[in-house]
Image: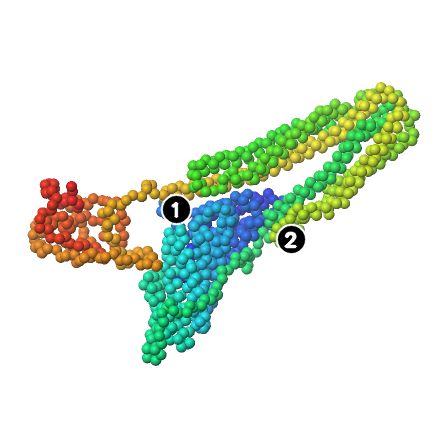
Amino acid sequence: MATFISVPLKKSSEVDLVKPLSKFVTATYPPGEEQAEHLRAVEELNKLRKSALGRPLDKHESSLEILLRYYDQLCAIEPKFPFPELCLTFTWKDAFDKGSLFGGSVKLALASVGYEKTCVLFNVGALASQIASEQNLDDDEGLKAAAKFYQLASGAFAHIKNTVLSALNREPTMDISPETVGTLSQIMLSQAQEVFVLKATADKMKDAIIAKLANQAADYYGDAFKQCQYKENLPKYFYFQEVLPVLAAKHCMMQATAEMYQSALANQKKKFGEEIARLQHATELVKTAASRYDEYVNVKDLSDKINRALTAAKKDNDFIYHDRVPEVKDLEHIGKASLVKATAVQAPLSQKFTDLFEKMVPMAVQQSVSAANSKKADTVNRLIGSLREATNLCNGVLASLNLPAALEDLSGDSVPQSILEKSRAVIQQGGLQSIEQLIKDLPELLQRNREILDESLKMLNDEETTDNELRAKFNQRWARTPSGDLYKPLRAEGNNFRSILDKAVQADQVVKERYNSHCEMIALLCKPENELSSAIPSANPAKTLQGSEVVNVLRAQLAQLDEVKREREVLEGEIKSVTFDMTTKFLTALAQDGAINEEALTSGELDTRYGAHTQRVQQNLRRQEELLSQIQVSHQEFSALKQSNSEANNREEVLKKLASAHDSYIEISSNIKEGTKFYNDLTEILLKFQNKCSDIVFARKTERDELLKDLQQSIAREPSAPSFNVPSYQSNTPAPVPAAGGPTPAPRTVFQQPQAKPQPPARPPPPNIPTQAASASVPVSNPVPPSSANHPPVAPTSGPSQAQGPPYPSYQGYPGYYQMPMAYNPYAYGQFNMPCVPYQAQGQVGYPGAPPVQQPYPYPQQQQQQQPPQQQPYYPQQ
């Protein structure tokens, strides 16, 4: 039985997984035990890849287990890391195309974890086929193991066929193309079915079952042969040139096996003519396999078994039954029974697999959590913003009414207590100097962020320019994703950052204008109490208003308003303290539905967490609005009771400005501190953005260098000149016959054997001329070997060398190039009466001799006689 077919492994270049994955972990997870655990897992993953791909693998199940674990780990981490942003480039060589001496092997480098998974799965199928081919098929356990591994290999190749184009988004190398892996899957399935035929034979199952199994195996091998032969690109590979005859031979042998067991079934049914017809057909099939594919298969055992059965059947039929032997075309078709199925590829493939990143959530969950946190921040900011806006509105209204300073200034000559408290608050926070220093630092922070953003985008622009230039130079050969398409998300992110900076500049300008408008009164608040008192105009006393009902009502309403403010501060603290994590809910949704409806889940959780707080905020705002309306009415009554004069109006106006300056100072100080924090936080974000741009540009440069190297090798392999016509005297040279022990001949055509070229007629014997005469006419330095010698003649050392033609290769068994012996010159027979010495290479048919020449050579004699016989040209000169 023929040797089983196995598939060679793909080879990968070394890839450092530690640096990019560790950078993502440190940027995503805060320092702590969780980050340290993920970093250790990254190290283990890098070691696992080196064990699976960085060393030769034994043809053992333990080596296959390492490959399966690495494939399962790739499937597990693919949704957990943003591989398109990490730009990890994986380089793999073609398993079949070994390239050329100068061009190197064909390989493909892609920044795609899907490409890595596809190539690893190819190696899973290849190693499974090698392990199956090493099994002992004489043992029952070996047969079971071989069938299992062949079906695993078939499933791996079939999975690649269905997923490779979507995983790569570009044209793959030929070894992992859908046509190639589809053919390999069919070959592995055929061999698995053949193993079941061997097992059924060893278990001595019924002849009808074995016949159906063998006929199905023959059908599988026939399909595999057709796929392998009729694909456009496969036959050019040496691997498939070796596989083709094996598939054809096994198709014949399995069909012959099916006919042999079906003949036994016919014997049992007393159909002796059918038995002989099937055995004769089986004999013809075996003879075909032996005559055409004897270099690849051994059919002696099967042939002997069929011949013995045919001899016995003929003997019994001739002497006893005399049953008519039908034609093969009239025989009933043998049924088919398939016991094999390609193993479905569903992660995890390894039973011992443990996810190294089990505690890391998938990227879909991370993105959903990020979106949920953003919506949570928006909700908190909206609620707190409405509270702060209400506080500012309240302060503005009270400042316009000069409250509570108007109630405290009934004497008309002292500084109101509320103004003194506001003055002390401004002085404690640093006064004008602190705000001026913060405002001075803002442009520097802004400029630093602009420089980081500009440098990041400049790196992308420079790399994209280089990519476009090379694409214009190499056209279709520059087969990689355009930088413009790849950088679209980064450019959108960069434009978003630029828009944020522009809005921040506008906000800074508003704060500066507000500061300039209140700068004078803020400076007045920063002065000591005596200077502040002298700066405020005095007015006539209004002591008659002390103890009045209007004043008491106003004070009570202001007290209620202060209570609303304190409640608002408590409410703001409660809103800020609300915490919740959506990770568990998102993981559950992903596990149950396979997708995450982030908007619905987040909205429901936010309503649950902040619904009560939202209602309390709205109640607080309504309560403040009611109190402000009441205060305005009471203030109108209070103003009507006060004595109105110009001095009182001036004093009240200054007190209003001081109160408004204090509120503006607090707000401006808060805004500038928030702006400073914003710029510092944005610097860290922009630095991460810059690192991301730097990493992807570096990866693109590495990919560009690899592609340029491959293009140079491809150009070097291309012919430097178009094809040209070979001269007829070169094309008519008889093909050399390889000597015994030479190189293995190329596989023969399966369906049609080449027609043998007609042998030339036998060469006539040379004319009987005495040796002395010949030796006297032509002096030679070495004796001429006899015509029966098998070795090529040796050229004389003293004569001129033969003109050299094109550098044709010399093959084993071919005499190569030798200087032409004078005794071999066919044009000298008539002139110099030389004997014709037969020249015959080893294993080469002799050339027909020249006819006897009666007349001198018909070409001009004068030109020939000017040269000595030793310099006689091989071809006649005109």
User: Disc 2 marks which residue?
Assistant: 588
- Residue 239 in sight from this viewpoint: no
Q: Nearer the viewer, residue 291 or 736?
A: 291
In the rendered image, which quarter contains the C terminus? top left
* Left or right: 126 in relation to 238: right
> Can you tell which quarter of the image residue 456 is in?
top right
User: Disc 1 marks which residue?
Assistant: 104
Cβ–Cβ below 8 Å for labels 1 and 2?
no
Q: Is residue 652 above or below residue 601?
A: above
Residue lying farthest bottom? 320
Give how far across and how far down residue 12 sits, in percent.
Answer: 46, 49
Amino acid carrying mark 1 in the image:
Gly
In the rendered image, which quarter contains the N terminus? bottom left
Q: Earlier in the sequence, mark 1 or mark 2?
A: 1
Amino acid carrying mark 2 in the image:
Thr
Q: Nearer the viewer, residue 477 or 680?
A: 477
Residue drawn at the location 37% of the way across and 70% of the way down: 278
Give how far across and how far down residue 834 sits, in percent.
Answer: 10, 51
Residue drawn at the location 48% of the way across and 51% of the way down: 119
Give how far across and how far down residue 535 sits, in percent.
Answer: 80, 21
> Can you tell which quarter of the image residue 398 is in?
top right
Within 10 Å of disc 2 (Cα), the crowding (few <14, some 14-19, many 20+) is few
Q: Is residue 201 above or below residue 181?
A: below
Q: Which mark is residue 211?
A: none
- Secondary structure, mark 2, is helix
Q: Nearer the viewer, residue 659 or 535?
A: 659
Mark 1 or 2, which is nearer the eye? 2
Q: Is residue 647 above or below residue 107?
A: above
- Residue 227 in sight from this viewpoint: yes
Residue drawn at the location 45% of the way across and 35% of the way down: 469
